[in-house]
């Protein structure tokens, strides 16, 4: 259960960022970001990954939170997470094939990036668009189709992120490879 939850939790962040792995740095500021994720699966609203974490036994929850913090993601209450991006962690060379995905990029401008990803671990496809309102705010809308226990599931997710400041405190920079 822990491994699948970690994959799911990391997947919502990674799904929000695959456009970064091509040779262009996103038009956002490095630093600490607050991220709110909302979604639905097969037409039904789903609880944010952070809310699902609250239902785990305390020992498992502590293990998952520690693992996510090691990757550079702090889980907060109310569907919020915090993530630290440094200039280095936003460098496209840093991403490589971290999410075992092949991504085809559509139109990109200073305010919008579109992509289609096919991933093998876990097996899924993602169609997404990142909308950059400013260097301190972005929204990602994505549709994911995933095979889970022999069934195909489709989900939509909206991730809203706002910049909190340049200092990440004790949170390590995000690293999908950790």
Image (spheres, rainbow, N blue to C red):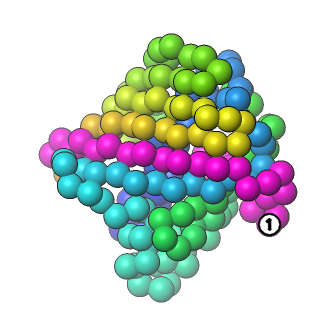
Are there few (<14), some (14-19), or many (20+) residues within 10 Å of tag 1? few
Residue 5's x, y, as percent?
41, 62
Q: Is residue 169 magenta?
A: yes
Residue at 81% of width from left, 37% of height from top?
87
Instruction: Tell which of 30 and 21 is nearer to you.
Output: 30
Instruction: Tell which of 16 and 141 is nearer to you.
Output: 141
Q: Is residue 39 above or below residue 47?
A: above
Residue 171's x, y, as percent?
75, 62
Q: Is residue 13 magenta?
A: no
Residue at 70% of width from left, 42% of height from top?
136
Instruction: Tell which of 9 and 59 is nearer to you.
Output: 9
One can see residue 11 in this view: no
Tell me the magenta residue range: 151-178
Q: Is residue 55 above or below residue 125?
A: below
* Residue pointed to by mark 1: 170
Instruction: Tell which of 78 and 64 is nearer to you.
Output: 78
One can see residue 31 in this view: yes
Residue at 53% of width from left, 48% of height from top?
160
Residue at the limit of the structure toward the front, as seen here:
133
Q: Secondary structure at mark 1?
A: loop
Where, quadrant-wise, is the N terminus in this rendering? Answer: bottom left
Q: Is residue 150 above or below residue 81?
A: above
Residue at 19% of width from left, 47% of height from top?
42
Instruction: Specify whether 65 is left or right of 42.
Output: right
Where residue 146 sits, quadrant-wise, is top left
Residue 80's x, y, as percent?
54, 63
């Amino acid at each position: 259960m822990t491994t699948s939850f970690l994959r799911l939790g990391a997947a919502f962040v990674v799904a929000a960022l695959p456009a970064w792995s091509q040779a262009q740095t996103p038009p956002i500021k490095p630093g600490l970001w607050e991220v709110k994720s909302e979604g639905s699966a097969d037409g039904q609203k789903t609880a944010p990954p952070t809310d699902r974490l609250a239902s785990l036994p305390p020992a498992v929850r502590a293990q998952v939170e520690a693992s996510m913090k090691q990757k550079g993601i702090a889980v907060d209450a109310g569907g919020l997470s915090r993530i630290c991006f440094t200039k280095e962690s936003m460098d496209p060379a840093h991403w490589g094939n971290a999410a075992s995905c092949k991504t085809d990029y559509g139109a990109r401008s200073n305010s919008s990036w579109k992509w289609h990803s096919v991933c093998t671990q876990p097996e899924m496809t993602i169609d997404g668009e990142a909308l950059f309102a400013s260097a301190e705010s972005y929204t990602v809308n994505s549709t994911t189709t995933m095979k889970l226990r022999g069934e195909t599931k489709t989900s939509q997710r909206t991730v809203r992120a706002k910049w909190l400041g340049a200092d990440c405190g004790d949170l390590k920079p995000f690293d999908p490879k950790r």
